[in-house]
Image (cartoon, rainbow, N blue to C red):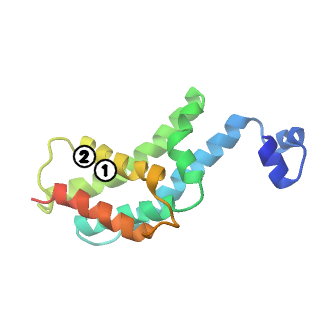
Amino acid sequence: MRDISDAVGILPGSLYVHIRSKEEVLLRIVERGIQNYLNSIETAVGAEAPAGERLRAAIIAHMRVLSAPPQTRVAFHQWTYLGPENQKRVVKLRRRYEELFSGIITDGIENKEFREVRNVRVSVLALIGMLNSATEWYSPVGGLTADEVGDLIADNALTGLHS
């Protein structure tokens, strides 16, 4: 709270006029972070295109959001510090995020673009795990852009899904 108050130029105690608790700050950061992913990926998912193209676009959209400020790391790693009720709110958002990928993969399977997988949810969670782990190693000032990394990750994911 001291860092936040210093950044906005007020006393730490004065923050509580605007914010009820530290948890409220964390919840806002987490929800906004996940919503950034949802907004970006929903655009990619909503396109009229084959499932492979939509999945690639969703993965690249994810990487673009991830290349933004540290809020993205907080969104996927710090939410567990929230209380039970706020965790439920975050889990709902995370499920919506998961459903975006599930929808693409299910469409691809139904359209015979992707092979049958034993468990769609496990495939989606493996993909999401791969994407979310990028917060640990990806740097926007590294040798590859977010789009290039997203394209490489999509190549790997699609190789596993194609017949």
Q: Residue visible at 47% across and 51% down?
A: 135
Say which element carries label 2: helix
Is residue 57 at least partly visible in the picture? no
CB within 8 Å, label 1 to label 2: yes
Residue at 59 percent across and 53 percent down: it is 70
Position of residue 20 in the picture relative to residue 163 (left or right): right
Q: Could you tell whether 100 is left or right of 109 in the image? A: right
In the rendered image, the residue lying farthest to the left is 163
Question: Residue 105's mark?
Answer: none
Residue 124, position as x, y percentages in the image: 29, 47
Inspect this view and state whether residue 161 appears: yes
Q: Quadrant of residue 156?
A: bottom left
Q: Quadrant of residue 100?
A: bottom left
Image location of residue 98, percent across then percent down:
37, 47
Judging depth in this view, the residue of 8 and 144 nearest the camera is 144
- Amino acid type of the residue tagged 2 in the rendering: Ser
Which label number is shown at residue 127? 1
Q: CA distance from mark 1 to mark 2?
A: 6 Å
Q: How dense is the environment of label 2, judged by Cα within 10 Å: few (below 14), some, or many (20 and up)?
A: some
- Locate the C terminus by quadrant: bottom left
Task: Residue at 50%, 44% (x, y): give it.
Answer: 76
Please state the horizontal and vertical placement of residue 158, each as a whole percent of the image.
21, 60
* Extreme residue in the front direction: 143
Dot label at residue 123: 2
For residue 116, side relative to residue 148 (left or right)? left
**Measuring 22% from the left and 45% from the top, which residue is drawn there?**
120
